[in-house]
Amino acid sequence: MTYQRMGATIALCAGLAATGALAEYPERPINMIIPYGAGGATDISARTIAEPLGKAVGKPLVMANVTGAGGATGSVAAQNAKPDGYTMLFARVGSHSVNPAMKATLPYTLDDFRFVTVYEINPVACAVRAGSGIETMDDLIARVKEGGVSYASSGVGSLLHLAGAMVLKEFGVENPLEQATHIPQKGGGAAATAVLNGTATFLCTNSSAVASFVANDQLTPLMVTTEEPVVGFDAPTANELGKPRLNQLVGWTGIAGPAGLPDDVAAKWGDWMAQAVQDQEFLDTMQARGSVIELMDPEAANDFIEGQYKVFKALVDELGMRVEG
């Protein structure tokens, strides 16, 4: 055999081997980036689904919290990874809906990722301290118009920051950032505490963050932003109050890879997630936290995230909430 033919044969074998390797994805553990810290909503969601998802994948999932910049640091790490399915990201409403809408210098766009699913929806609930004299959204809006109302958030540029302004705007409050004082806190737990101790009048946050306070009659829920009622929250839905646009105001968790993720890899993730979300322990744990498990395929996930972004971006532009730097 000539060297030329031998080289061609080797190249052909290598190509076949590469094709076989691709077809057998995954051959090794998959790195899963969690762009927020331990104990937060994203971390809890990711680690709760890790076991049933790992069983479906058939290979270890290496979970790593890569934190910083409101989810941007971990997102950039996934953005810059090779699009081969071996580095995936637990994307979140903050990192991929709020950040793109609010932050002018964000080092990525939605186009830098391929979303394979959204699997968890966190309804947003607006709540006040029990005994505050505010029992309904109408009561709250009347109090805002009287003056002296404030709302707590988990920080400037967070979902809670946007949520408070968006809710007030939808209920007819002009210039909500002037009519109600925003009081940023260091995290969602601190935001709830601020309402409990009277530092702030109300907050609009993920239902899971206030479920225990509502159950213990410490906080009174005024509304949930979903179309359907939320278990454990004796409060009207946004649709019942004639505000269906607020259905976009929800938290969510999904999984994404870098742009360029192959179709066959994305399809496998769809199959794996369909198996994982049927795990009863996972369902029980997440539903007890007020989460709604709703599996979206890639097309539905992208449409949902893009729709959220457009609604948030329009509000940010209208109210001048763009964060520079």
Image (cartoon, rainbow, N blue to C red):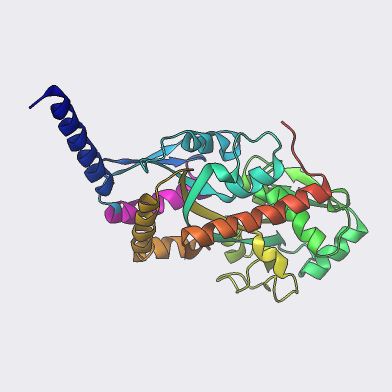
> Residue visible at 59% across and 47% down?
96
Q: Nearer the viewer, residue 138 or 220?
A: 138
Which x, y percent locates residue 300? 52, 62
The residue under the point 62% across, 49% down is 97
Q: Is residue 78 left or right of residue 170?
A: left
Q: For this rendering, which residue is in front, 83 or 137?
A: 83
Magenta part mainly helix, strand or loop?
helix
Is residue 181 on the magenta stretch? no
Q: Is residue 150 left or right of residue 80?
A: right
Residue 286 position within the rendered picture, expressed as x and y whole percent measured from the top left? 46, 61
> Relative to 90, is 214 above or below?
below
What residue is shown at x 33% (from left), y 63% (from top)? 275
Q: Is residue 250 visible?
A: yes
Q: From this view, report whether residue 12 is shown above or below residue 266.
A: above
Q: The magenta stretch spans which residues?
A: 38-56
* Residue 40 belongs to magenta span: yes
Residue 73, horizontal then vertical, whole percent = 54, 33
**Above or below — where is 34 with respect to 48?**
above
> Outermost residue toward the left?
1
Quadrant where the image shows the C terminus: top right
Q: Quadrant of residue 214?
A: bottom right
**Could you tell me if residue 120 is visible in this image?**
no
Q: Quadrant of residue 1?
A: top left
Q: How many numbered marks are there?
A: 0
Image point 78% across, 44% down: which residue?
A: 321
Query: At which x and y percent is residue 28?
Result: 26, 40
Direction bottom: furthest residue: 240
Side of 187 relative to 89 (left or right): right
Q: Residue furthest top?
A: 3
Q: Nearer the viewer, residue 258 or 232?
A: 258
